[in-house]
Image (spheres, rainbow, N blue to C red):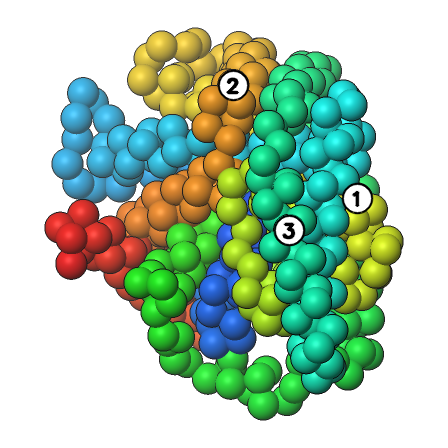
Amino acid sequence: MPEAAVAEPPRTLLESLAHLGPGIVLASSIVGSGELIATTTTGAQAGFKLLWLILIGCIIKVAAQVEIGRTTLTWGRTSLDAFDRVPGPRLAGRGWIYWAWGVMTALIIVQQGGIVAGVAQTLAAGMPLTAAGRHWNAAHDEAAGLVVAEAAARRSGDAAAADRLAVNLADARAAAAALPAPPDEATWCLITGLVTAGLLALGRYRLIERVSLVLVGTFTAVTLLALVMLQLDGAWAITGRELAGGLVPGLPPAAAGRSPLVTALATFGIIGVGASELMIYPYWCLEKGYAAAVGPRDESPAWAERARGWLRVMQLDAWVSMLVYTLVTVCFYLLGATTLGRLGLVPAGGEMVRTLGAMYAPVFGSWASAAFLVGAFAVLYSTLFVAAAGNARMVADGLILAGILPADDRSRAAWAKRISVGWVLVAAILAVAVNQPVAMVLASGIAQSVMLAAIGVAVVYFRWWQADPRLAPSREWDGLLAVSVAGLVAVGAWTLGERLLQAMGR
């Protein structure tokens, strides 16, 4: 429910800052699997070569985000209702974007399963439940430590020490591979699902907002500290040439028959404001009370003045959140390129969390595991918590538009809560059944990258056919919006083309 009735907008920057919130909630769902898993995997595969694409992926979508929010504040519609009005083919009374959203949402549940698996891996590594789990952790931790030690020896020029460590590493890997997987991760998957379901059943907007702030703050602090300390170490520091090379648009060569661009395009769909977050953002704006403060649209000058004022607040909210997630995304990409890329490690399967933890070893040494587990849990769990709550609101809205659920506010809120509970439980089951977190996250990323093209088309319709002329933005903003739309459509079409070529074996 909205937090406020019709109200005048804040007049100063300080007053406006007090009304921010939706963007931080959004950032806490953004700064998660895309950054910790997809972005670092891209850095591990491509080195610094795709830094330019990561920056574009974070910045280019903000104009589209604001334009979707403008439509919500103007007409008081939910975003899915607004998207369903975009002209085009219709099936069973619903528009083409509605059905595309349905497919994307199914894959987002798979992504959430990957996140549950990632959370379970961090918990199993930090708090094993069985003796077998402790033994398994010790063996794999030893192998992970030797990987970093061997790389450090080679980077320092001590070939003899590196060769000895390589022999020890081969023995440690063989010993670890021979151990059967303990039940700890599966158990933690189920515990995570049940606990999160309980929190969502009790949670309201303010609980979600406060939990998000704490988790994102923890995650950001650990990430920034790691990158700063890494830069102070001459053996691992990023050179000016490497950084400059990453800012020049170009494509890295394929490795092992696979182009890092495939991973990068999937990453593009979920870093920054992903397709699902673009559609979810207006729901958080509605719950924050922006639309209620504007009031029902009318032709009066007072309404237009209020709407312009609250639009400025929403724009500030969107830009502040962009600064947060861009900073963290770049930090993670650089960590992945600097450490994983140089170590020759790519996160995958049940070793995802331990492989990602190697990013911290050159900085924190023996403390690396603990430092990484805190940061990994914070970011993954915040994504799980907030994305479940946000997607549940969209699913409830989709069922209302389909005529399956009643449309009154009380029923909408009740069903959103029930769906959020079911969402995380299904994700937990998928986590146990599949347990391939990287693949699960990237599958959703591909779907979201394709969906960006549909969103680009919708944004054009919102701006040039649905906008209230009294709220029309400046020409400069329209230019930025045109660039944003072109980028969304290009990436969506490119990703779809890449997947079709792969399906045809080319």
Element type where label 3 sits in the image: helix
247 vs 417, left or right, is left
Q: Residue at x 68, y 79 (%)?
A: 159
Q: In the picture, residue 211 is in which quadrant?
A: top right
Quarter the C terminus occupies = bottom left
Residue 393 in picture, x, y percent from top left: 52, 26
Sequence order check, earlier mark of 2 and 1? 1
Of the two numbered discs 3 and 1 in the rendering, the one whose residue sits closer to the viewer: 3
Q: Amino acid at mark 2?
A: Ile
Residue 119 in picture, x, y percent from top left: 66, 34
Q: In the picture, residue 229 is in which quadrant?
A: bottom right
Residue bearing the label numbered 1? 374
Q: Residues within 10 Å of mark 3 (few under 14, many from 20)?
A: few
Find the residue positioned furthest to the bottom: 241
Whether tag 2 and tag 1 are in contact, CB under 8 A, the answer is no
Q: Is residue 327 visible?
A: no
Q: Amino acid at mark 3?
A: Asp
Q: Residues within 10 Å of mark 2 (few under 14, many from 20)?
A: some
Sequence order check, earlier mark of 3 and 1? 3
Q: Amino acid at mark 1?
A: Val
Residue bearing the label numbered 2? 429
Residue bearing the label numbered 3? 171
Please give the count of numbered marks on the rendered protein: 3
Q: CA distance from mark 3 to mark 1?
A: 29 Å
Q: CA distance from mark 2 to mark 1?
A: 24 Å
Element type where label 1 sits in the image: helix
